[in-house]
Each structure stands twice: as structure tokens, then as C-alpha cells.
Image (spheres, rainbow, N blue to C red):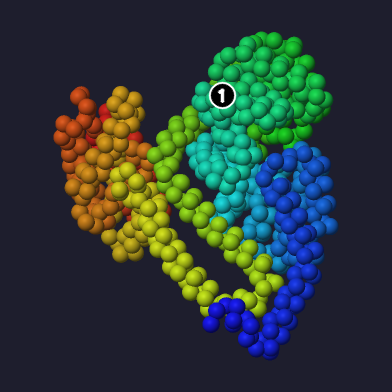
Amino acid sequence: MTLRASKRYMPKQFLLIKMMLLTSLLLVNNSGYAEQSNNQKADDIFTLLNDGTISNNQAIHSYIEQLETLVAKEDTSRQLRLTRARCWAFDPYDAEQVPKAIAFAQYALTNPELAKYPNHKLDLELCQSWYYEQNGNVELALKGYNDAVNQAYALEDLRLIADARSMRGFLHSYQGNFTQGLEDLITSQSLYQSLNLPAWVSYNLFEIATSYRRFGDQKSAIRYYRKLQDSYIKSNDLDAANAITVSIAISEEERGNLESAKKLFEQGHLYWKVNNKESEQAMVAVNMAGTLIKLRKIEKANQLLNEAEPFVLPTDEAFYSFMHLFRAQILLANNQLNEAHQSLAIARKTFERVKNIRGLAELQLVESQVFLSQNNWKQAYLSLNEYVRQHKKLDTKRLSSYTTEMRTRFNADQIEAENRHLIENQHLREIELAMLEKNEILQGIIILLGSFLIVIVSFFAYKKSQKNKLLSALALTDDLTKLPNRRYIYTKAQHCFEEAQRAKLPLSVIAFDADNFKLINDNFGHEVGDHALELLADTCREILLPNHQAARVGGEEFLIMLPGMDKNQTFDIAQILIKKVSGADFSEFPAHFALTISAGVSSLDVSDDKLSQLLKRADDALYQAKSSGRNQAKMQ
């Protein structure tokens, strides 16, 4: 029977049912059209606010007023999104607004509906932590950021992961913790790019450039700044372009190019003055004062600080602290030593509150000069000694940051694989949510097609499960050496540590890395360096027993877990490893190529209650081996 014939002989009862069904669907569609229209308008505004393209506070509040008329009271999910938008809409530059924002977030978090919407709840907690930071409570803010990062990964919410790590990275960088700062900022940068959020890519790239500036790589910082500045000029965002000019000026000052820095500061200062931006003008004035002090133009520097002081509030910790530090330098130059101490006390209080190691180091140097001018030799010595200690601490963090940057480059493929995994999962959830909203109108049809959909979903779930297993395996393996990576070995090490403590069994570790590996890359190229790392991995496989586990934990850094081995046995294995590497067949490598390693050995001690203590002794022994001439092993 043809299709036309089947319609012709369709029973009248069925035709009646079909007409009733179509009529019901039309009625449902008409009644829901207005609601759908409002929901779409609201979602478009939420997207606009989320994209970061709207930075004007007045415009943000205007959009929020529109949302209040569009979002239905009974629409819980969108009402919570509106609450999130309200939380982020407080002005962080208004000292009175910041405590109000914290109070708003605290109250909003008492909403019992948030238990059903963990993503909304987490964003409100992140908002609260950010305003804690603006209010100077950085310890509470950092704790909130740490919790937010962990929860965001558990929820696999890419945007919240990116936001939490970006905020935490900024705070770490400002405090001088460049290692953690760069790891967070580089990861969030990759996620923002994957999510196609160009505004947040730009904001985050600015923080990456600033992190490079803070730990002393001014060349990289200026390169990133100029890239950003070009994009802002092309989009006619002259305010942002001028802000980058000021950042470049700071980098030029730290490179010692004081006259270049002064010209750029003057350019930025004039721009804000012409555009009647008094607050921004004051910030540039503070920075320019620091440059003028170094140029011994004390009177002009003092004029700029006097101009800036009414607009720089204690809540602007960065500028407020350095304004008083520069004021102390001017007072020192004018031999007003007691007043200089008073300014230093204000600056110290602010630096300590936000844990700015870099600022504290500079302060100690100025304080020692003030004491020296007062012939207080003892206090001058103590301040200078504290300056050296703080500077050493800062240098250590900077060195660690260079290592982090290299490690991040080596692990770039792994980061991308993990991010792709998260993106796929988020896309699936977005599809599910879209389907649920549409199916509220078409529930009858879903019931009829339920069995068929279950088969399809099960098939895709199986495929997804298989893919996740593969991605999980890749996420725990180093792509170059095919050894386990840092994440896997630290989990394995914790298990071995707990088992050894429980059963009273010996446990030892070897931490080793390639000597002068940077020179290998510089002299022979990164491809040869990669082959050298593969040789180290193959050597580990050759000499280790089946129950021993080697892993690559960083650029040229490796860690070996040896359960059941005491310190002397482990030291012998380290010696064999060192000899095997130095005596390896390098015929496949370029002429004059040589490779050695240094190793640190440590074993479980009865006083150890944390794995980190065991690993730290191995790292200390490795450092001792490096300091003693390399190509050897030491044990602690």
C-alpha cells in the first residue's frame, strides 16, 4: 500500500485523536511563546555579561535591570544566574561597595535552592573570595580560590576552572609566588582560548605578561604587552591601550631604561589627564614618582605623589603601599628621617597584609638607608640583613618560575588533552540541558520515543566511556618518554608511603635530573634534548626491578620509587644509574655530545609523617650532588 493510499483509508477515530493532539501542541506552543521569547532575551544578556565585553559599571547595571523584568520568579535557574550577575556588579574601586558585595554574597549563599545548582553556588563563592581579596583579606581569598579550583574540576565546569585559576594566579603572582601564578595563568589562558572568550583571553594575557615582568623577564613581558596593545589599538580601545603603555613603562624601568620609562609614564599620565580620569591618572603618578626618584628628580616626584594622594585609597593596596614607600624615599632624600619611618610603617602594614614579598624587600633596603642616616648602625644592619633574606626568598621563587615555565612547555600536549576532555564533557551537558528545556513542551513525544532514545544514549555513553578510559590513560603518561607522569607517580608514592608505614617496611626514593640540560638544548637543539630524555627513560627501564617505578616529573627531572629497598641498596642503584648514563653509547648523538646526571637518595624515617618530608630530603640530596660537582649521588 502506498503512503497516499494509507492516508486515504486511515480510521476516523485515529484522525480525531491526531487532530486533538495537534491542537493541544499548538495551544502549548502559543502559551509558551512569550515565555520562550523572554528566556532567549535573558540568555542573550547573560552571555553578553559573561563574555567580558561589557566593562562599564553603569551599562552592567542597566542590563541587570532588564534581566529583572525578563526572568520569571519561578524560573529558579535563571534567578540564580541573575543573583550571580548582581554579585559581580558591585564596583571594586568603591571602598563602600566592597563590604556590601561581601555581605550580598554571604546572604545569597544561604539560598537553599543552591543545593540543586552547585555551579551557581560555586560562582557565588568565587565572587565572595574575589571581594575578600579587594578588601585586603588575601588569606581568606586564597583559601576560597583553592576550594573553588578543586570544586570546579570536580564539576568539570571549564569556565569556573578558568576563572578560579586566573584569579588565584593573579594573587600568587602579586605575592611573588611566580611558580603557582604562572601555572594557573597559563592553564586558564588555554581554557579561555578553547571557550572562545577573546576579552578574557586579553585580560588573562595581561596578567601573564605582568607575571613575567614581576619575576624579571622584562623582554618577554614587553613582547606580550605590545601584542596586547596592538589588538587594543585595532579595536579602538584606547583606554586599554594606554594602560598597556603604563605597564611597558614599568618594565622599561625595571630594565634600567629610566628615560624611556619616564617618557612612557608621561604619555600615559597625559592621556588620563586629558580624558578626566583622575583615579587612573593618580595610579600613573605613583608609578612615575618611583622612576623620578631613581633619576634624582625628587621635587617633581613629590609633586606627583601630592597630586595622587587624594585618589589612592587604602583599599588600592598595590598603589597605596608603593605610594608610601616612595614617600619615604623622598623624605629620606630631604633628611626628614622620622617622617620617613612613619611612611615606611604604613607601607609595611599594607605589604604584609597582602604578603607582597617584592615590596617588603624594597622597603627593607630603604629602611636600612634611613637608619644609616641616623647613625643607627645596628638597626641598619638588621634591616639590610632582612632585605637580603627577602631578596633571596624572591630569587628562589623566580628560579622556580623559570623551571615551571619549562615544565609547562613540555606538558603542553597533556594540558591540551585534559582541556579537550573537559570541553567535550561540558558540550555534552549543554546539549542535555537544551534538550530538557525543549522537552518540557514535548513530554508526550519523549515518552513514545523513550525506548529508542535509551538505545542511542547507551551507545554514545559506551563510546564516551571508552574514550574517557583512553584519555585517562593518556593523562597519566608522559608523551615523550612513555614513563608515568608527575600526577601518577605522586599518587603511587602516597600509596607506597602509607603501605610502608602500616607494614613497617623500608621505602626509598631517588630524585635525579640531567646535568646542564639547558646547555644541551642551547648547543644541540631541543630534538637532541628530547632524545636525551628518552635515553634516561630507557636506562631506568633497563636497571629497575618490576616493582620499582620511575616517572618524569618535570622538564629534565625524574623520580624513582623503590618499595622494600633500604638507603644503602638504593644508593647502589643510584650509582649504577649514574654510571650507565655517563657511559652510554652516544654514537647516535652529535659529535662531542655527553650526558651525565646527579641524584639524591632518601629513605623512610620513623619521624616521617608526610610523604613531602621524604621527597624533600631527596631533593636536598640532589641539590647537594649538584653543588658538589654533578655526575654523582648523595643521600640524606
The image quarter in which residue 67 lies: bottom right
Whole-percent x, y for residue 204 in the image: 60, 38
Q: Residues within 10 Å of mark 1 (few under 14, many from 20)?
A: many
Amino acid tagged 1: Ile
Identify the image quadrant of the C terminus: top left
Which residue does the image show at 60% across and 18% down from the upper left? 253
Provide the residue designation for mark 1.
Answer: 222
Q: Nearer the viewer, residue 502 or 34?
A: 34
The answer to whether residue 257 is left or right of residue 525 is right
Whole-percent x, y for residue 385 in the image: 53, 25
| Circle 1 SS class | helix
Residue 45 seen in the current view: yes
The image quarter in which residue 136 lies: top right
The answer to whether residue 124 is left or right of residue 97 is left
Residue 102 seen in the current view: no
Which residue does the image show at 47% across and 54% down from the upper left? 421
The answer to whether residue 511 is left or right of residue 586 is right
Which residue does the image show at 23% across and 32% down from the upper left? 595
Whole-percent x, y for residue 171 in the image: 60, 40
The answer to whether residue 374 is left or right of residue 543 is right
Q: Nearer the viewer, residue 556 or 65?
A: 65
Q: Is residue 432 above or below residue 262?
A: below
Q: Is residue 222 above or below residue 567?
A: above
Whole-percent x, y for residue 33 in the image: 77, 65
Which residue does the image show at 69% across and 84% down from the upper left? 15
How many numbered marks have been drawn onto this rendered protein structure? 1
